Amino acid sequence: MMRDGRIATGWGLLAMLGAVVAFGAIPASAATTLETIRSRGQMICGVNNELPGFGYVDAQGNYSGFDVDFCRAVGAALGVDVRFRALTPRDRFSALQSGEVDVLSRNTTWTISRDTNLGLDFVATTYYDGQGFMVRKSLGVKSAKELGGASVCLTTGTTTELNLADWFRANGLQYKPVLFEKADDALKAYEAGRCDVHTSDKSQLASLRSAAKNPGEHVLMPEVISKEPLGPLTRHGDNQWADIVRWTVNALITAEELGVTKANVDQVAKSSKNPEVQRLLGTTGSLGKDMGVGADWALKAIKAVGNYGEIYDRNVGPQTKLALERGLNQLWSKGGILFSPPFR
C-alpha cells in the first residue's frame, strides 16, 4: 500500500508539473517578470517591424508605431529602457511563452482559444478592428461578395485564415488562398499580381496600402467580416506584471478623458484639484505602491508618449498616411467604445 501510495503521489506530482507547463503558471521560486526586468535594467517587447503606423523599423534601426508606443509607456512607468524584438505571426507566442520577451505588443487579436490554451493573457484592448479586403481599383468590384473565385493573399498563422474560410463558406463562394509568413511578402505578391485580393485587419490593410508603390490604385471594400480586438499579452500566472501593463494602458486612456497630455502633465500634476487626476498622477493615494511601482508611474508613461489620443493621432490618425478615423476607438464619451475602469 505504501508503495502504491508513493506511486500515486509521484503521478500526482507529474500531473501538477504538467499543469504548470500547460497553463504557464509561475512557480513560487521563479523570478517574476517585474523582478527580471529590474534585474536586467531593461524591458524586452515583442513587436511587428514591417507594419507602418503600428510597428515599423527604419533603415537606422529606429522603431515607431502605435503598438511600439504602448511598450515605451510601460518601460517609462517602470523607469527602464525598452528593447524591441521583431516577431512574425508564427513565432510571436512562443517568444513570450519562453521568456524571450516580457510583453507582446504586436497587432494580435484577442480570442478565447489564445486566451485559454497558450499560457498567455490578453490584458487590454488597445485597438478595436475588423477584417476586410483590399483590391485594385482596376478590378472594378464594389463589394466583397463579388469576389467569388478570386485568389487571396494573406499572412499565415493569424485569425485571418479562419475568418476568411468562414466568410467565403457562409456566402457560398469559392476562393484560392495564397499564404505568406510575413505581411510584407503578402503585399509584394499582391502588388505583383499573384493574387486578386489582399485580406487582413482593416487597420493593417490601410498600413500596407500606405506602403504600396501607388497607394491610390487600391481600395478597401466596405465589408467588415470579423471582430478583431487587438492588444498586448503577458504570461499567464504573473498577475502583478499583467496589472502593470493593463493599468498603463488604462492610464493613457484616462489621461485623454481628463485632458492630461504629454505637454501639460507636469503642470497638471502640480496644480490640479481634480481627485481622479491626483490619483492618476500619484500626487495622492497609493495606487502605484499597490502595484509595486512608483507613485508617479502614470505621469512618467504619459510624459514619455502622451495620452491615448496623442498616440493614435501621431501614428495612425487622420493626418497620417494611414488616415484612420477613430471610429470605435474614440472615447466612450465621444461616441466610441474606448473605456477605462476608474482610478480609485
Image (cartoon, helix red, strand yellow):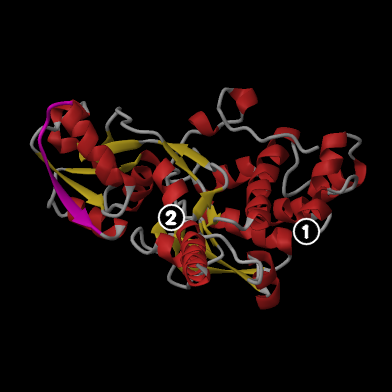
Q: Residue furthest bottom?
A: 40
Give the number of callouts.
Answer: 2
Magenta-drawn stretch contains 179: yes
Q: Report the magenta residues as a range.
A: 171-180
Q: Kindly identify the residue that appears in the image at 50 percent across and 67 percent down.
A: 1
Q: Is residue 111 visible?
A: no
Q: Nearer the viewer, mark 1 or mark 2?
A: 2
* Marks 1/2: CA–CA distance: 26 Å
Magenta-drawn stretch contains 136: no
Q: Which quadrant of the figure contains the C terminus?
A: top right
Judged from the image, the secondary structure of the residue bearing numbered disc 1 is: loop
Labels 1 and 2 touching (C-beta < 8 A): no
Numbered mark located on residue 6 in the image: none
Query: Badge 2 local density, few (<14 within 10 Å), some, or many (20+)?
Result: some
- The dominant secondary structure in magenta is strand
Amino acid bearing label 2: Leu
Numbered mark located on residue 292 in the image: 1
Judged from the image, the secondary structure of the residue bearing numbered disc 2 is: loop
- Residue under numbered circle 2: 118
Amino acid bearing label 1: Gly
Picture layout, residue 103 above or below residue 133: below
Picture layout, residue 338 above or below residue 34: above
- Please provide percent x and percent y for residue 181: 27, 60
Q: Is residue 144 left or right of residue 271?
A: left
Q: Kindly identify the residue that appears in the image at 75 percent across and 41 percent down.
A: 260
